[in-house]
C-alpha cells in the first residue's frame, strides 16, 4: 500500500513504513497526552474486569501499548485531515486478492 500525498508544490509517495515512521515520530513519551492516559486506564480496567487480560500481563506494558495505539491513530487522523491523501494499492496486493477470489478463498 502506498500513500500519495498532494501538496501545493508537488506529490509525495509514502510507503506504509514511511507513514508509520512519520506517525510514531510524533509521539511524545516525555509528556503523554492526559486524555489518552484516561482512556488507557478505562480500557485496561474494562479488559481486566471482563477477564480479557490476566494479572500475568504487566499493567505498565499494556498501558504503553494502548498509548502507542491511541497516538498513532490520533496522528493518522490529523494526517488525513490536513493533507490530500490517496491510498493506492500496490499491484501485487491486487493480484494476490484477485487470485484468492478466483480460487474460491
Image (tube, rainbow, N blue to C red):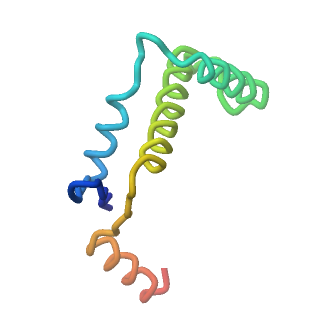
Residue 13 spot, x, y in % from top left: 23, 57
Residue 6 spot, x, y in % from top left: 30, 58
The residue under the point 26% across, 75% down is 91
Q: Is residue 22 left or right of residue 82?
A: left
Hey, which residue is sitting farthest top in the picture?
30
Q: Is residue 47 left or right of residue 102?
A: right
Identify the image quadrant of residue 103. Answer: bottom left
Most foreground residue, 47 or 51: 47
Most foreground residue, 46 or 1: 1
Question: In this picture, is 29 found above or below 18?
Answer: above
The residue under the point 38% across, 63% down is 87
Residue 94 spot, x, y in % from top left: 34, 76
The residue under the point 30% across, 37% down is 22
The residue under the point 32% across, 61% down is 1
Most foreground residue, 13 or 47: 13
Residue 42 spot, x, y in % from top left: 72, 23
Most foreground residue, 13 or 62: 13
Question: In this picture, is 64 found above or below 76?
Answer: above
Amino acid at each position: 500500500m502506498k500513500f500519495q500525498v498532494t501538496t501545493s508544490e508537488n506529490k509525495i509517495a509514502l510507503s506504509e513504513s514511511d507513514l508509520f515512521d512519520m506517525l510514531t515520530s510524533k509521539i511524545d513519551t516525555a509528556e503523554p497526552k492526559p486524555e489518552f492516559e484516561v482512556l488507557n486506564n478505562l480500557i485496561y480496567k474494562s479488559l481486566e474486569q471482563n477477564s480479557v487480560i490476566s494479572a500475568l500481563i504487566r499493567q505498565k506494558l499494556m498501558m504503553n501499548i494502548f498509548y502507542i495505539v491511541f497516538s498513532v491513530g490520533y496522528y493518522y487522523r490529523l494526517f488525513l485531515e490536513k493533507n490530500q491523501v490517496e491510498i493506492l494499492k500496490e499491484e501485487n496486493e491486487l493480484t494476490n486478492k484477485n487470485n484468492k477470489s478466483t480460487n474460491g478463498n
